Image (cartoon, grey):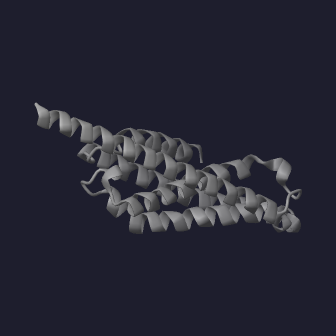
Amino acid sequence: MAVAVGKMLEYDFRFLRFAHLSPTAERTAELLRTKTTMTHALQFLWLTGVGLVYLGYASNPHYLENEKLWMKFVTVSALTLNGVLMHRFAFPHMLRTTPFLALPFRTMLGLSLFASMSSVSWLFAAFLGIARSWNNTVSFQYVLSIYLGLIAVTAVGSMVLLSTLRQYHFKRSLVSAMEFSSD
């Protein structure tokens, strides 16, 4: 989990620095390495999660009554579905030669939703793994509302951030083009 979260955050922050530039072979290779790492981490998360649930259930048949456990299942399932959709829809756009911020506006914002869902889901799954005080004390609805709220806030924040970066780089390139043509 720590490897996945660290790799995701490292890639996301590095990606933002270069979102206005055409992808290079090096950045494309980095995206593909990150994709592979995240896929393996998700597979490992499922394997260890199923193993831990089995051990918990074997030692206590009431183990499955923990509503936080079911929220963990929902979170990792959402993370898995998001990953499948990212592979199908997001990565083909990311592997093109077009700078991310130059993609059609709706495409750019749609891709930011995938990233928001991924970031929140990885971090929330990690949190649920250590939130032992929530075991058998909080309702599924309560935890779900926090999860959905975090997704909404992150999605809106990423859309605002990307829209702002897009305007900044568009204005900056427009000014550069005007200065070049006046010379």
Q: Residue at x 63, y 52 (%)?
A: 153
Question: Is 145 situated above or below 1?
Answer: below
Task: State the image coordinates of residue 124 (x, y, percent, origin top left).
Answer: 66, 52
Is 110 situated left or right of 60 in this image?
left
- Residue 50 in view: no
**Residue under the image location 40 percent in, 69 percent down:** 88
Is residue 174 shown above or below 59?
above
Residue at the extreme left of the image, as rendered: 183
Quarter of the C terminus within the rendering: top left
| Residue 143 location (% of width, % of height) | 77, 59
Give left or right: position of 150 versus 68: left
Does 130 sit above or below residue 137?
Answer: above
Judging depth in this view, the residue of 140 and 163 nearest the camera is 163
| Residue 94 point in image, percent of width and height | 34, 56
Indicate left or right for 95 with 35 as reference: left
Q: Is residue 108 above or below residue 11?
A: below
The residue located at (87%, 63%) in the rendering is 60
Which of the 4 quarters of the picture holds residue 177?
top left
Instruction: Please provide percent x and percent y for residue 19.
Output: 36, 45
| Nearer to the camera, 57 or 173 | 173
Quadrant housing residue 54: bottom right
Number of marks present in the image shown: 0
Residue 107 appears anywhere in the view: yes
Residue 44 or residue 148, whichever sits in front = 148
Considering every residue shown, the one lying at the far front of the view is: 182
